[in-house]
Structures are given as structure tokens and as C-alpha cells.
Amino acid sequence: DIFWSFVLMGWTAFGGPAAHIGIFEKVFVEAKRWMSPTVFNELLSLGQCMPGPTSTQVSFAIGVVQKGIPGGLMSGMLFQYPGLLMMSLAGAGAAEILVNPDAWLRGLSAGLSAAGVALVVSAAVGLAKGQCKDQITSALCLMSATIAYYYQSNWIFPLLIVVGGLTTLYTKRNDDVALPDRKEQIHHLGLSKLSGGILIVAWLVIWIAVASVVNTSDYDGNEELYWFEAFYRTGSIIFGGGQVVLPLLLKDVVPRANSWITEEQFFAGLGVVQAMPGPLFNLSAYIGALAARRAGINVLAGIFAAWFGLFGPGVMLIYGVLPFWGAFRKQPVYRRALPGLNSSAVGLVVAAVFQMSFKV
């Protein structure tokens, strides 16, 4: 069932990360009932609190909690590969055409964006009904939505969720705590806590090692390593994914003495990726292909370095953190913080409704 659910979704998940969350909620919570709304919101909050593309991390996590490590790999990769394939082809052979796209492509992008807004609205309403059950959680949702709408900083997503959790941790400090009921039980967490800890350490070691090599070597002859380091660094410090990553990527790949791609090519790729299914992070495959063409290197090497560099940290972290989350979610301190964590995460989805509405 994971295969058939995600193989279709990979080709139809238009609209960006907020729309993807809406699709997940509709399909896996409401229609298939793979998990309760509470568990889904916990996974969403977890993704929002970690670096990396949130919708991608949730796609892997859904597969993990259903069928363990293989399920997570299947769900995550099936969700990513259509956009990866099409953006790779765009970078490898159609970049010049895309600098001046035809009207039909612009119209297609606008239409798909409008459909994405409708999905996000539906998800926001459903999530808010399930999580905002009293004045405190409703106020946290409203506060989170308002701040996220006006202040789109890299650190704002995890900060709002943490503040929400601390708020209900305090307001519910004297309340009795109930353990997760049968609907909220998690039967698969993927790795053991030891393996998860090793994976988190590996994420840091790779970051430090690659950065050290790049800082002591020349660009010429080490192009793939430079690309991987830039995208891996970006993927390791970006929270929320999607639109948050674009300014950093633009700063990294264009204004260089050995510019990897032109500004026109960057914005052309941005226009195309918004009309494609899957995460906006797939723009990395397009950039990697163009950078490789410009450097006279095998295009697949550029795609691999950029795409795995950007996606790798977030995927490693979700696999590494899930086993610790599985144990911690039974603790009283977490159960008291949970309403605030979830309602603040819903507020971020509500903010996305208004942000997307004014752009369509």
C-alpha cells in the first residue's frame, strides 16, 4: 500500500511544502487512517524543528512508522523521484529555453499553485479543528500564524514550536497525563537509539570533514566537492525548507568569481520547479546539472553532488531522531508540551495559506 500511495502522489503533489502537508493529512489521516491526527501533528512538529525540507522528512517518517526502514525509504524516494527526474532533465537539456518560458508554462504554474492553496486551506481547517481545543491552544495557533506570516526568518519555525510547547508545559503542569492510547501507538521507529545516535554523529562528521577539505583545496579539480559542501551546509542549517532555502542557494551559486550558474538560469529553474510535483528542494538537481555542464563535468556527478547534498542532512536527521522521539513521547513532560507543539505547528500551516493566497 505504501508503494501505490506514494508512486501516484509523487507525480501529483503540486503546490509546494504546505500543499504536500495538506495532501498527507487528507490521504493518510482522513482517508487511509494510517495514523491519528495527533501522531501526524507530532511528525509535522518534529520536521519543523529540524533542519531540512519538512514535507520530505514527513514523507520518510510516514513510511517508517508504517513499515520501518524499508517503508521509509520507499515512501520518501517515491515522493521525490518525479520532481528529481524532471528537474535533472531541465538542467541537462532545457535551461536556455526556460530562461524565457512560454505563456503556457507560466499559466500552468499559476493554475497548479491555485490548486495547492485549496489543499492547504482544507488541511489547515482540519488540523485546527483537531488540535485547537481550548483558548490556550487556539491562541498559540493564532500567534504562530501571525508571527510566521510577518517574520519569515530561518529560525522562526522551530522557535515558535518550542515556545508553544513550553507554554502548555507550564499551563498543564498540574494536569494528569495520559499515555498514548491505542490509536497513538507507534509500532515502527526504524533504527535503534544507538544507530540513530550514530547517524546524527555521522551527519556532523560529514559536515565538518567536507568543509575542512573545501577550505584547504582549490575549486578547479574539486568542483563536485565544492558543490556538495555548499548544498550540504545549506541543508544542515535551513528549517522549514521550501521558500526559506532559496535566498541561501541564490547567494551560494550565483555571486561567485567562478559562478556556477547565471542569475537568469536560477530564476528560470525556480519557475519550473514550482510547476513540478514534489519538494522545491529538487531545484538542486537542476542547479547541479547546469553547474556540471558549465564546468565540463559529467552531468550526473553534478546532480548527485547537489541533490544528495541538499536532501541528505534532513533525511539523516529524521531517521536519527525518530527512535529518540518514540521513547520521549511517552514522558509526562512531552505529553504536557504536546498540545502547544501541535497547535503552533498548525499555525505555521495557517500562515502558509495566506502567504500562498497573495502570491497566486
Image (spheres, rainbow, N blue to C red):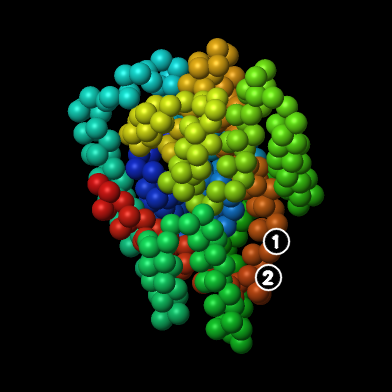
C-alpha distance separating marks 2 and 1: 8 Å
In the foreground, 11 or 257: 257
- Classify 10 Å Cα crowding around label 1: few (below 14), some (14-19), many (20 and above): few
In the foreground, 218 or 324: 218
In the foreground, 79 or 68: 79
Q: Which secondary structure, mark 2?
A: loop
Q: Is residue 193 above or below residue 83?
A: below
Question: Which of the 4 image quadrants contains residue 30?
Answer: bottom left
Q: Which secondary structure, mark 1?
A: helix
Residue 193 vs residue 311: left or right? right
Q: Is residue 205 above or below residue 267?
A: below
Residue 153 vs residue 112: left or right? right
Point out residue 269 in the picture as x, y percentages from the top left corner.
39, 30
In the foreground, 147 or 167: 147
Q: Residue at x 69, y 48 (%)?
A: 320
Q: Residue 43, labelled with which disc?
A: none
Q: Is residue 350 visible?
A: yes
Q: Residue at x 49, y 34 (%)?
A: 255
Confirm or deny contact between disc 2 and disc 1 (CB under 8 A).
yes
The residue type indicated by label 1 comes to Ala
Residue 336 vs residue 294: left or right? right
Q: Residue 327, labelled with which disc?
A: 1
Which residue is the site of mark 2?
A: 331
Q: Residue at x 27, y 39 (%)?
A: 112
The residue type indicated by label 2 comes to Gln
Q: Residue at x 50, y 61 (%)?
A: 156
Point out residue 209 in the picture as x, y percentages from the top left corner.
76, 36
Q: Is residue 122 visible?
A: no
